[in-house]
Image (spheres, helix red, strand yellow):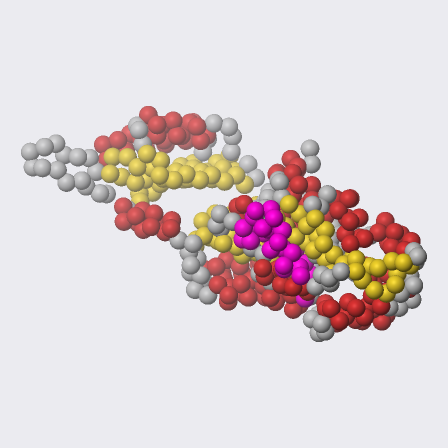
Amino acid sequence: MLTTPTNATGPTTPDIELILINIYGQDKPGVTAALTEVLARYDAQILDIGQADIHHTLALGILFRTDSERSGEILKELLFKSYELGTKIRFSPVAIDEYAEWVGMQGKNRWIITLLGRKVTAQQIADVTKIVSEQGLNIDSIQRLTGRMPLNADEQPLSKSCVEFSVRGTPKDKSQMQRQFMDLATRLDFDISLQEDNMYRRCRRLICFDMDSTLIRTEVIDELADRAGVGDKVREITERAMRGEIDFNESFTERVALLKGLDESVMREIAENLPVTEGVERMMTVLKRAGYKTAILSGGFTYFGKHLKERFGFDYVYANELEIEGGKLTGRYVGEIVNGQRKAELLRLLAQFENVDIAQTIAVGDGANDLPMLTTAGLGIAFHAKPKVKANAGQSLSTIGIDGVLYFLGFKDSYLSDAHR
């Protein structure tokens, strides 16, 4: 209790009391209204309130302030009202200094940790929260972003499960925590994202994608090479380039040269049958509905990027232009090569053109030549990426389709369903 001093001749000022009530029971309409009406009649000040509903079971907490003259009546009425509602109630006094310390924590850094996969297990949550605790962070809230999991989820190959943690404090070693999360995600087969919960996270506006092996499940240059009969040669160069073992510009020039003489009609046939990555249509529907600007920044070819632009509504496409003469590829390209550095430059230029702070941008890609834009963007996501890329990217998405990006942005399944109406 906190006693407010008064003069010796004046009336005694009532002591201030802080009381936390926890209500449990079957969730039904009117519970919160009935209990807060009791507090309102006694002019109690609500300092904090939170509620969760798990399988129709309510967990409601209210921290309120009152004076000692009224507290007894308030608690008695709350007890009777809880009995009428068929819920259980528990009262806990809160010390003034404890509350003051809690208020002081409100200025601390806040972080969002997102766990995502085909399913989220108790072991994954246990190991992640252990790291959170070791880093000196406190969990404020936990919410599920995906819909309720059916019992036969293991039999549904495209199922998704996502849990988001809001935590508070300053990590002892943020880089170490990030590495621990990524190692854990690889070992336990799930995805994880760590983001500072600031104004930029809540107002992302521009998202840029690599194309080959990101928006589509293939490398188009390999498809072209197969038609030209040089698939093995080109694929070997592609793999070395994606692993960062050879210079991208050199490898690009070598691969394009091997396509000389290929008929233009082959490009049309490949474009019409591109194997689109799981979740692209769902993701683009939501991003467009939410007002995001979207771009394809690809080391592949504009012919195929424009096909995706028309099909899914991307706002921009920047890629490489193959030279065609007499209906056949010449083995040369036109203009500047879109390599890793060029992707990062294009990201910055698009942000300036759209009047978007670079911290409000997102980049998604899988290869070594995507790293410059992944590290330039406010949020860089390695998608089904090579080991080198995952090791250097801030976030990784490997267990589900590309629409998993939406959960890293904080979208819930309920919002995503609304976007399809």
- Foreground of the two, 391 or 376: 376
In depth, the one of 4 and 379 nearer the eye is 379
Horizontally, is 302 left or right of 173 in the view? right
Residue at 34% x, 47% y: name it: 103
The answer to if 248 sits in the magenta stretch is no
Q: Is residue 293 left or right of residue 17?
A: right
Q: How many numbered marks appear?
A: 0
The C terminus: image quadrant: top right
x and y percentages locating residue 6 in the rendered image: 12, 37
Depth check: give the residue in front, 214 or 62.
214
Q: Position of residue 169 (x, y in %)?
A: 42, 56
319 sits left or right of 124 in the view: right
**One can see residue 139 in this view:** no
Q: Which residues are magenta?
A: 342-368
- 58 lies above or below 249: above
Which residue of the protein is positioned furthest toward the bottom in this rendering? Answer: 245
Evaluate whether residue 93 shows in this view.
Answer: yes
Quadrant where the N terminus sits is top left
Instruction: Indicate the position of residue 262 as horizontal and vertical percent values.
Output: 91, 61
Q: Residue at x 42, y 27 (%)?
A: 34
Please provide percent x and percent y for residue 188: 62, 62
Residue 47 as seen in the image, left or right of residue 150: left
Q: Residue at x 79, y 71 (%)?
A: 237
Between 51 and 123, the one lying in front of the other is 51
Residue 228 location, quadrant: bottom right
Give me the residue at 68% from left, 50% from top. 295
Seen in the picture, residue 201 relative to 320 is either above or below; the reply is above
Residue 364 belongs to the span the image colors magenta: yes
Q: Quadrant of residue 15?
A: top left
